[in-house]
Amino acid sequence: MADVELVLRSTRVVTPEGTRPAAVAVTAGKITAVLPYDAPVAAGRVEDLGDDVLLPGLVDTHVHVNDPGRTEWEGFWTATRAAAAGGITTLVDMPLNSLPPTTTVEHLRIKQQVAADKAHIDVGFWGGALPDNVKDLRPLHEAGVFGFKAFLSPSGVDEFPHLDQDQLARSLAEIASFDGLLIVHAEDPRHLEAAPQQGGPKYADFLASRPRDAEDTAIAQLIAQAKRLDARVHVLHLSSSDALPLIAAAKADGVRVTVETCPHYLTLTAEEVPDGASEFKCCPPIRESANQDLLWQALADGTIDCVVTDHSPSTADLKTDDFATAWGGISGLQLSLSAVWTEARRRGHTLEDVVRWMSSRTAELVGLSDRKGAIEAGRDADFTVLAPDETFTVDPAALQHRNRVTAYAGRTLYGVVRSTWLRGERVVADGAFTEPRGALLARPQ
Ligand SMILES: [Zn+2]
């Protein structure tokens, strides 16, 4: 073992076999062995982490970086720094809110070029499925996008129109023809139109304008299409617990459907959102605490597969106090691990559970399980060093997000990220960053 470059020792290393004292050997950016804690290893460098926990770096498959085009909302430099500060080592960028959206190979190349020099962590890309780009889907797949996002109701930006049911069927048939993955914002537009659209600062009115049955109906339709075409689909940002039985039934029936939810649905409740506080606005909305309990139950039993941020920031001026017109999106990159861990811990879950939801399963979703999502030999040496029992109070000024609007301001969270490691190099420690060294990722062929 003389050529080991680096060893990270901790009394608590989260591995697929459980949490245990171990020494993790790294060479050329890869984990080469997970050894007993006190194994004698001749290494170029040994880092003793003591009782801080060594986790695999998180893989966040739902991030709106908005770069190029809306870089005043976010950007690759700021988003990837915030992610690194929060223990995330891989993100997959959503195809919309940037200009251009990632809906052709040419647009993908533009985005890759913009990201290349700014990425502090590894970055991959989703493509977009629009009513008029079916012919672009296969070329995008071959160019390395991890799958395709579609909306079933208006997306919030004009350049990314939603699909009706016929268009969904057409796009999904094309994607199924190369066994690609369709990821879907599932709210049914007819149910949204039929709901009372009151507007104004009252959160209860906003919640009533995005009812659960809009989600439930859209998910039922998506499952039916996936079943008919034997296609792979993924439900984005599930909020409605009423949809859980039909998702569980579809999975039991062999339908190829996976589901994510987000830190805000798991840690914030409708009851506590102050009127006018549109930093809490997202679509679908944060719902009641009884709904949240069922989401946690579904994570525990596997009906929900994973947890991702849906980091979707805007400038502060778009977060007006009218819930109808304020930008919908919650910034969560830097805080997602601590927010989820705080609530998971309170509910009796372990860090191993959090790693499964936020790293292993998300890596699996995008086909990166050979490289990411676990501390085991052969995978990339991407790590998060966490002090899980230490707390901090969220100070917006300490956030690396370009806009420091946050729904978590003033909250006390468990889990301080001490450092984040990307392919064997520490990229952030105690708030100090290295120069960007993230790589652009493509779907494994
Ligand atoms: Zn999103």
Image (tube, rainbow, N blue to C red):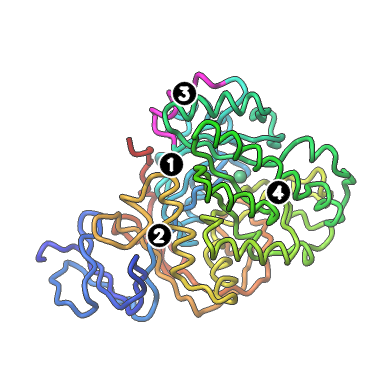
Distance from mark 3 CB to nearest ligand 1 atom below 8 Å? no
Name the amino acid type tagged 4.
Pro
Q: Quadrant of the C terminus?
A: top left
Name the amino acid type tagged 1.
Gly
Drawn side of residue 2 relative to residue 303, left or right = left
Q: Quadrant of the N terminus?
A: bottom left
**Residue placed most toward the observer, 305 or 228:** 228
**Mark 1 and mark 2: Cα distance apart in space:** 15 Å
Percent coordinates x, y for residue 194 in the rendering: 85, 39
Magenta-drawn segment: 133-145
Q: Secondary structure at mark 4?
A: loop
Drawn side of residue 208 relative to residue 307, left or right = right
According to the picture, the residue beneath numbered tag 4 turns out to be 284
Distance from mark 2 CB to nearest ligand 1 atom below 8 Å? no
Q: Earlier in the sequence, mark 1 or mark 4?
A: 1
According to the picture, the residue beneath numbered tag 3 turns out to be 106
Name the amino acid type tagged 2.
Gly
Percent coordinates x, y for residue 44 in the rendering: 17, 66
Name the amino acid type tagged 3.
Glu
Q: Earlier in the sequence, mark 3 or mark 2?
A: 2
Estimate how packed mark 1 is, as few (under 14), some (14 to 19) or many (20 or more) residues with alpha carbons within 10 Å. Answer: many
Disc number lying in front (1 or 4): 4
According to the picture, the residue beneath numbered tag 2 turns out to be 57
**Mark 1 and mark 3: Cα distance apart in space:** 16 Å
Q: Earlier in the sequence, mark 4 or mark 3?
A: 3
Q: Earlier in the sequence, mark 1 or mark 3?
A: 3
**Mark 1 and mark 4: Cα distance apart in space:** 24 Å
